[in-house]
Image: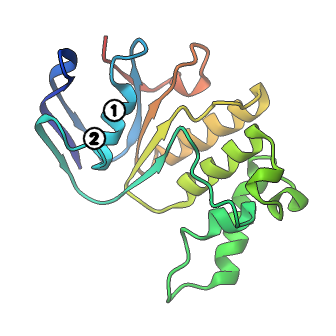
Amino acid sequence: MLRLENLRKAFGEQILFENLSFAFPEKGLFYISGESGKGKTTLLRMIAGIDTDYSGSILREGEVSYLFQDRRLFPALSALENVAIVLDKPSSDKRENRARAAALLGQLNLTEADMKKRPAQLSGGMQQRVALARALIYEAPILLLDEPTKELDEANRQILSTLVKEESKRRLVIVVNHEAADPMREGATVIDLA
């Protein structure tokens, strides 16, 4: 469950939004739209609990999985390890975790050789797909994606769109993107912060 109630966010004199209220269902695809500087990324950070400097309330049950704009990959780990690490728990099977991570990375067009490389050895688009795989594989009831198609070519945008739409059938997915021709927007509920 996620509910925004009378949210107001400002930086000094600049008001990003006020009286923002919205009740999200348990699953579905939502697309936050608006001009640059209107607070789209800030709203995701508020939902995730990272930004707490606002008035109003956010009622949220459960964890979030968050794709940040700046990827936040571990430089010393391979692409595969960067994804599998979010599955590793004392009671989990590490072999199975790596197999799941490899399967998802394969869906996102990374080869076995790519999966062994560290982030610095990968292109920007490959790094983006590793970060996406890590966000997608983490089992949280809310998935937040900030500019997920950044540095992806058209073929990989389509693959990601299909994966995200599948995810939205089983959990809540909220997307922020600045690209006008984003295939994820089709069929999504749009929330405009204009």
Choose between 108 and 45: the one closer to the eye: 45
Q: Position of residue 122 (x, y in %)?
A: 81, 48
Which corner quadrant of the image does residue 21 belong to? top left
Coloring scheme used = rainbow
Please tell me whether residue 81 is drawn above or below residue 4 in the rendered image.
Answer: below
Q: Amino acid at mark 1?
A: Thr
- Count neighbours of disc 2 (C-alpha within 10 A) and say few if under 14, some if 14 to 19, many if 20 or more: some
Provide the secondary structure element on which disc 1 rests. Answer: helix
How far is the residue under mark 1 from the one under mark 2?
6 Å
Q: Residue at x 46, y 43 (%)?
A: 168
Q: Which mark is residue 46?
A: 2
CB contact under 8 Å: marks 1 and 2: yes
Q: Residue at x 33, y 24 (%)?
A: 39
Choose between 27 and 146: the one closer to the eye: 146
Q: Pointer 1: what residue?
A: 42
Image side of residue 193 versus residue 80, left or right: left
